[in-house]
Image (cartoon, grey):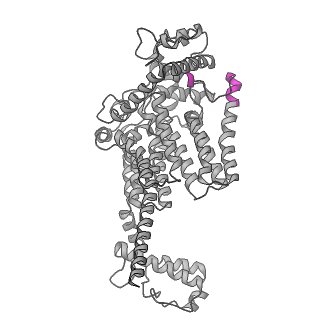
Amino acid sequence: MILDSGYVRALPIADIVSLTLRADYSLEDIGCGVERVDTPVKAKGIYQVMCSRLLRRKEDFGGVGPNGSAATLIKSLLFTAVRAPIVLAVTVAVLLRAAAMLGYQRAFWYGDSLDYVTNALQVFPGTVKPLGYSIFLRVLLPFHSSVLVAAIQHVMGLGIGILIYGLLRRWQVRPMLAVAAALPIFLDPRQLAMEHSLLSETLFTFCLTGAVVVTLWRRRLTGPAAVVAGLLLAAATLTRSIGMPLVVLYLALLPVQRVRFRALLAAIASCLIPLFAYGLWFQAHHGVLALGASDGMILWGRTMSFADCAKIRPPTVLVPLCPRKHPVHSIWSDPNAWFYATGNSPMSPDNNSLARQFALRAFVSQPVDYALIVVRDFALTFLTNDPPVTESIWLFSVAKYIGVEPRAVDVAEAYGYEGTFNGITPFWTFLERYQYWIFLPGLGLLAVMVAPVVFAVRYKRLSIPALIPWTMAITLVMLAVALGPEYRYLLPAVPLACIALALTMAHTNAVRTTTTGATAINGTHAEAASSG
């Protein structure tokens, strides 16, 4: 069957599409490589599609059979799946998550889980945690299963990795580099443990990464995309209040991306309107326009590692907030703590205001002491959280034994926490060994954070697309260390840092290629001029 120009002109589009999917035509059948002067422009495009399809099969998997026909479509797809690195990475990631689901047949329970579940049962704007993750749990409440919660969060983890890969490939990043950027999400055991926990980190990371991916999906942000990105960022902030500084940073950086004014307004509105509405709801219950009433308490808790009231000299009302001479193991579990003696709820807006006042005085009075504490904790965060740190509660071998505290038993039953831990031994045994084999080292994460700056300085070029994810990742790390070093608070920064590094490396490679090409052309012109 030879396709001449007249045949192609008369052939319906549907038949042409079906013809390109057939597996029994060869390169010679459609005249690949033959110049057709009389072929219309549309027909030439059809020839290019059909020929490129066959040539790709032939080059990639030897896709020509003994009779000269193209290999079957199923065989081609199979070879494509085997050769594509993302398919292998996703397959391994799915198997790891399946092992977690079979090995630990309920989600891990931590201290913060109680606040999330309590708010989910009451649908009430709590003072400690925003309501975003609790609404997610509320939607799943009819199933009374923490296993379902963990399963959906595992799907979110897979989605984060796939979003990273899709974004980077869209920006012409090489497949191997794009897959490498997604591997910390696919394979890191602490990421798996977070996905298998009744904690907000996975939902927060998914919304945050989704906002960045939607923002960078096109070269220039459109109005609808700005609305979606803004809503995702608002959802992330209502999941964890640490997202509020990221909202300000994101909106400040959008003009650098050369965003149209309408898209910028759409992003601002879609970000701020949900947050303002939630703030009004919170105000109706607690009398304060805010997303929560725990920021001051967190800052006050941070000052307990260095505060010296002889230097701070607080007013009388703040004296009870000074560190005790014989501190207990945890300031939050001290029955004699000052916030129990004020006559208010421990996490009330009034107590939060007092704690914030004390913390700000401590930071102003002892800036050097606070800076030294932050530097120390910054180093410890990257150096002391890698396996085999066996006391880390973010390891499978430790998390499964934490269990539900006695005061939370009745609440936890709503999500199927009854009886003792159970699971299939080979699977949890494998994961508890795997967590010591493959993970993203703390120094590796630090290198990923620093590398974009090194590339920018080395080649004197700044990758504009990488600016939003990189600054967000750095902000998350600095806030996590400044407010209280805990490794799980660093995990949402990992996908953003990986996106920034991959985009920077691709941009750097393009700059080097352009520079090399320009140098070669200039050299050729110089030789021609000298010979002339």
Q: Is any atom of residue 195 visible in this view?
A: yes
Compared across the picture, whether 15 is left or right of 380 comes to: right
Question: Which residue is drawn at the image coordinates 55% and 17% (left, top)?
Answer: 358
Question: Viewer-proximal residue, 466 or 13?
Answer: 466
The percent coordinates of residue 420 (x first, y second) are 38, 27
In depth, the one of 244 and 311 nearer the eye is 311
Residue 135 in sight here? no
Range covered by the magenta-colored residues? 280-296
Query: In percent of the image, x 48 and y 48: which residue is there?
Result: 160
Magenta span includes 282: yes
**What is the quadrant of residue 87 in the picture?**
bottom left
Q: Is residue 404 above or below residue 226?
A: above
Measured as percent of width and height from the top left, residue 351 is found at 59, 16
Judged left or right of residue 295, residue 273 is right
Q: Position of residue 181 (x, y in %)?
A: 41, 51
For the image, the number of numbered tags is 0
Note whether 341 is above or below 392 in the view shown: above
Observer-nearest of 409 and 262? 262
Apparent side of residue 85 relative to residue 352 in the rendered image (left or right): left
